[in-house]
Amino acid sequence: MASLRDIKSRITSTKKTKQITKAMQMVSAAKLNRAENNAKSFVPYMNKMQEVVASIASGTSSAQHPMLVSRDVKKTGYIVITSDRGLAGAYNSSVLRHVNKVIQERHNSTDEYAIIVVGKVGLSFFKKRNMPVVESIVGIADQPSFADIKDIASRTVGMYADETFDELYMYYNHFVSAIQQDLTEKKLLPLTDISAEGGKLSSYEYEPSEEEILEVLLPQYAESLIYGALLDAKAAEHASRMTAMRSATDNADDLIGSLNLSYNRARQAAITQEITEIVGGAAALE
């Protein structure tokens, strides 16, 4: 049995750990509120952008753009969104494990795919496995702005345009609620499945022409999809970390209770031992 001093030391250290996890839980809860609002406020913009793109792409047979047409797949691109820090439960591992499995099943050579990764955890994961990371970005703010990822989003869309790869998939955790985050796989390019929300298309007049508008609008739309996924993933990250820290705090409470019980039992045993020794000594003097 551990000594009273050892048990007391463990109780003290566990209480300090509990204070840390409780503070991290509260910080993540505050960040989650802002991140959730950011993700929701971006939805109307994306819906309108999708409506306009769908109207042009579906409303005329003359407007064509390479981003709307499928081509023979020689190389596939993967955008993987992870976090810069851990302590977020299965937030990173679920995405990375799934992406790694998909790549192993689809490809026989590293020449057949390229990875664009967001977050230190994902970058470290792929580098350790010598997988081809062509673009990466770390240090994204907890409440990211479009300017934070504009360059990498633009380069990624550009790599599809110049046929560095022929299709592009995106993987991230979709925020559902504070206790649920769903692993999401989305085919980003080519844009072969564009439809307006509700299935209704508005009528627009275009100046100068549909083709010229598509030339500008489609890259912006693809970049906005990446940014929207990042906002969604950030909300999921904060929710996952908040849940993980809450579980850690609850576990610390349970451990402290168990250690207090062990401490009291050890103390009672020590007192009983001392009483037994005193009684035995008194009896020996008689």
Image: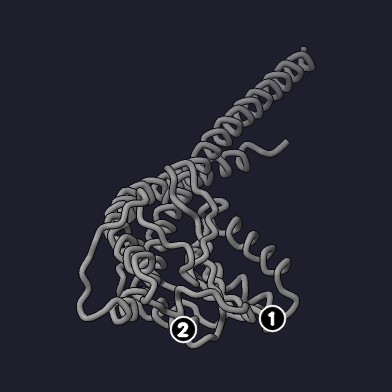
Residue located at (56% from left, 81% from top): 165
Residue receiving disc 2: 161
Q: Are marks 1 and 2 in contact (CB under 8 Å)?
A: no
Q: How is the image coloured?
A: one colour
In the picture, measured across the screen, residue 105 lies left or right of residue 57, that is right
- Occupied quadrant, residue 234: bottom left
Place of residue 19 in the rendered image (x, y in percent of width and height, measured from the top left): 43, 45
Place of residue 113 in the rendered image (x, y in percent of width and height, measured from the top left): 63, 78
In the picture, measured across the screen, residue 126 lies left or right of residue 280, that is left
Q: Which circle's residue, 1 or 2, is located before the other in the chain?
A: 1
Image quadrant in which the C terminus is located: top right
Which residue is outermost to the right?
284
Is residue 25 or residue 234 the one in the foreground?
A: 234
Residue 21 to residue 146: above or below: above
* Amino acid at dot 1: Thr
- Occupied quadrant, residue 103: bottom right
Which residue is outermost to the front?
61
Total marks in image: 2
In the rendering, which numbered label is found on residue 143? Answer: none
Q: CA distance from mark 1 to mark 2?
A: 21 Å
Kindly report which numbered mark, 1 or 2, lies closer to the viewer in this rendering.
2
Residue 186 to residue 19: above or below: below
Residue located at (32% from left, 62% from top): 143
Residue 47 appears in the rendering: yes
Residue 20 appears in the rendering: no
Residue receiving disc 1: 110
Place of residue 248 in the rendered image (x, y in percent of width and height, measured from the top left): 52, 43
Label 1: which secondary element: helix
Place of residue 264 in the rendered image (x, y in percent of width and height, measured from the top left): 60, 26
In the picture, measured across the screen, residue 54 lies left or right of residue 10, that is left
* Amino acid at dot 2: Ala
- Occupied quadrant, residue 142: bottom left
